[in-house]
Image (cartoon, grey):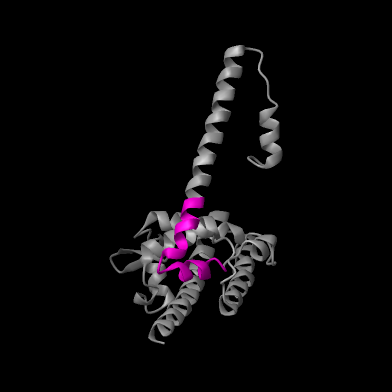
Amino acid sequence: GKHWTGKHRTWLANQSFSQPSQQIAFQHYCQSLEQIEDRILQLDQEISRLLPEWSLCNLVCQLQALKGVGQLIAITLVAELGDFSRFSNPKQLMAFLGLVPGEYSSGNSIRPRGITKVGNSELRRLLYEAAWSYRTPAKVGAWLIYYRPDSVTQYSKDIAWKAQQRLCSRYRSLTAKGKKSQVAITAVARELTGFMWDIALAAQSSFSQQKQN
């Protein structure tokens, strides 16, 4: 089966070694893993506790309408990017994140090359992580039903569903044409950024109107 699922963890717990020193070392590794997971859980809980006090909490919640965008990814994006309206269109945001193709110029010839990779590499990594969620056909899964914040607006949900239909199809189309999975994921991450921009601008506009009223 897959690594680090519940089934895999049960299998690990039942492993035994003939040498006592090996068994001790193995148990030490397992305990260290559990301690790290406990610390991560505590930090996640503290982040969840503090999030409602942040002025950009609603923006974080709206971005979580998108498949693959959990609380930590949304918080990191908002903390690093701040005001999404400083990008006049989605392509500017894509370029800022280094997700657009570059060019190689030599004399009179201009050849396309891979993405520029300028800007924040950590944000690109998170976008790639989110993009992997679009490898399977579009559907309203359990995560979207049970774990998406209650404050997500219908507009954000509609954009998220549109994104899921488009990006799942995009991934399958590219891989069917023989593109490597990482190339397809990069393309999905780039387009996902555009849907994020759309949701973010709507959320920020709504927040501004509420402040004026």
Q: Where is residue 36 in the image (x, y as percent from the top left)?
A: 51, 37
Q: Position of residue 108 (x, y in %)?
A: 30, 69
Q: Nearer the viewer, residue 150 or 96?
A: 150
Q: Give the range drawn in magenta.
A: 45-65
Residue most toward the bottom? 213
Snapshot quadrant of residue 105: bottom left
In the image, 45: left or right of 10?
A: left
Q: Which residue is drawn at 57% across and 69% down?
A: 65
In the image, 136: left or right of 119?
A: right
Q: Position of residue 48 (x, y in %)?
A: 50, 57
Residue 186 in view in this figure: yes
Residue most toward the left? 107
Q: Residue at x 38, y 86 (%)?
A: 212
- Residue 55 located within the stretch drawn in magenta: yes
- Residue 58 located within the stretch drawn in magenta: yes
Q: Which residue is drawn at 38% across and 77% down?
A: 85
Residue 177 in view in this figure: no
What secondary structure is the magenta-colored segment mainly?
helix
Snapshot quadrant of residue 81: bottom left
Establish if 180 lies above or below 88.
above
